[in-house]
Amino acid sequence: MTVASNLNKKSKTTLMKKSILTIVFVTIYTSMFGQSNDKRLKGLEQEITNWIEEYNAVGLSIAIVENDEILYNKSFGYRVLESKKPITENTVFPIASCSKAFTATLLGMLESENRISLTDRPSAYIPTLQFSTTEMNASISISDLLSHKSGLGNVNGTLVLFPENNRLKIMEKLKYIKPEGKVKESNLYSNLAYTVAGTIVEEVTKESWENNVQNKIFKPLEMTSSFTNLENAKKTDNYALGYGLYQNEIKQVNFEEYHDYKPAGGIRSTSKDLSNWMLVWLNNGKYKNAQVLPENFIKKARKFHNSRDGDDEPTLFFQGYGLGWRVETRDGEYRLQHGGNTSGFSTLVVTYPFRKFGVTVLVNQDDSILPYIIADIVQNRMLNKKQVNDYPVVVTDIYQPSDMIESISNEKPPSKSLASYVGEYENRGYGNIKVVLENGKLYAIYPTYKFFLEHLHYDIFVMKPSKDVSDIFNPEFAINFKMNESGEISYFTMNLQTEPVEFVKKQ
């Protein structure tokens, strides 16, 4: 199983029937903008409530903007299910990959100040950066990073399993990581590319990505309940916990720790704050008559820069990537949108630049398409299109550890004693893994995780988490130990990329 399926939880999709366990609640909070008299929104609250119950979701927060004002801002359900704490328009949610547009915007602002060009190579601003091929070094531009044309691909293993204490150390690994596609000819979604983009911001400004987001975007847009780290979000005492479904039962899950890949997904915000974010994009960078974002970048970011694979749908004319956004024409409407999935949360921000309205939907349910359904309902109402009533109910089950088998297979036993596998293994593009023997059992120790190595057969073991992990990946990778010509264990392979990644035993 590759990291694309493992770390992104795409290996298992559950088509749910009517929920066995339904949260029974009414609309428990009405914000100051919730009482819209707009005829287009009549009955919307009941429709949203019905879909929350159909999805067995814990809670939802929604904001709709039009022209230069917040038209509707309302919340449903609970931010903490166990104690029935309600969601409000100021409840903080992780917005995951919706963060990418913020990172792209910072680079657009730097270009407007003539401090960079989006056509430049990343190494012009990160001197220590080298990619693994001459073609990548010569061809990748900053714009390619932002539109997923770099060819790097979503090699999340190096970010999730081997976090560093600063982003420059991640840059040093890139020359050892094989690309997943060709530069400028691929459309491979990449958190790693956005980590590089965030590092460029830091190197040019000599300030952290976090401070740049806070000072250049959050403050001027009055996004007072938005954060770049979990600790500060928790200090508000108005943050949502994450939940997921497993066989139709609701389970709380851990937050994802973004470590040094925050530029790809580390922002936490609210429906009210994201209303201001949508308004500035709908008004060519202006917020309350002040030019906060460069108009030229707004126009550049929402253009089509790269194609995107997808279903062949009669109403979808094209889809692809802008800069930090996905762009598409659906049902005859041009949309700028981005979704976000993280452990326990699904989010969506959609704007219609030429219709001058947008909608944000935040849900504390893991890997759910509920935000897309609600956004589609709002689109049809706002644009007076035909209503759809037969949306599917699709949620991906959260990862749950399988039973641990502590015994060694007698039919296909290891070729060596367990002590022979002990040692430190290295891949310079990822990091070091220590294999240790404790109480007659093998464990793999990563910088932030410890896994029991369950014997599968011969020299192949499967990683099993020794404690709860956030629901961002299925960590049960197979580790395949290999011998050298002398019959000694010298390396192992893991399927962290399309081709197995080798970790060599250090002497």
Image (cartoon, rainbow, N blue to C red):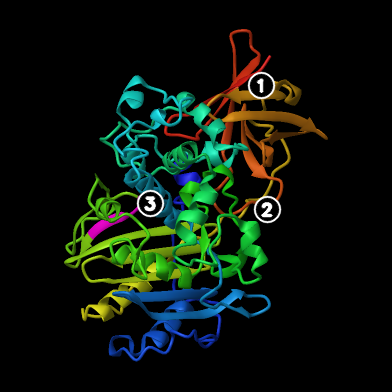
Three-letter amino acid code at the position of disc 3: Thr
Determine contact: label 2, label 3, CB under 8 Å: no
Determine contact: label 2, label 1, CB under 8 Å: no
Tell me how far mark 3 sits from mark 1, CA to CA.
Answer: 54 Å
Which portion, as a residue range, is magenta? 324-328
Pick whichever of labels 3 and 1 is earlier in the sequence: 3
Pick whichever of labels 2 and 1 is earlier in the sequence: 1
Three-letter amino acid code at the position of disc 1: Ser
Picture mark count: 3
Let me know if residue 363 appears in the view.
yes
Three-letter amino acid code at the position of disc 2: Asp
In the picture of the structure, the residue carrying the numbered disc 3 is 105
Query: Is disc 1 placed on a helix, strand or loop?
Result: loop
Tell me how far mark 2 sits from mark 1, CA to CA.
Answer: 31 Å
- Of residues 495 and 351, the one drawn nearer to the viewer in this rendering: 351
Pick whichever of labels 2 and 3 is earlier in the sequence: 3
User: Magenta residues: mostly which secondary structure?
Assistant: strand
Residue in the image at 83% along x and 35% along y: 439
Residue 275: % across, % down: 41, 70
> Residue 415 — which label?
1
Split into 4 quadrants, where in the image is the C terminus?
top right
**Image check: 275 left or right of 75?**
left
> Residue 158 — which label?
none
Q: Does the magenta portion include 76?
A: no
- Of residues 329 and 468, the one drawn nearer to the viewer in this rendering: 329
Residue in the image at 51% along x and 73% along y: 57
Disc 2 residue crowd, few under 14, some 14–19, many 20+, Cα 10 Å:
few
Residue 350, above or below 343 = below
In the picture of the structure, the residue carrying the numbered disc 2 is 468
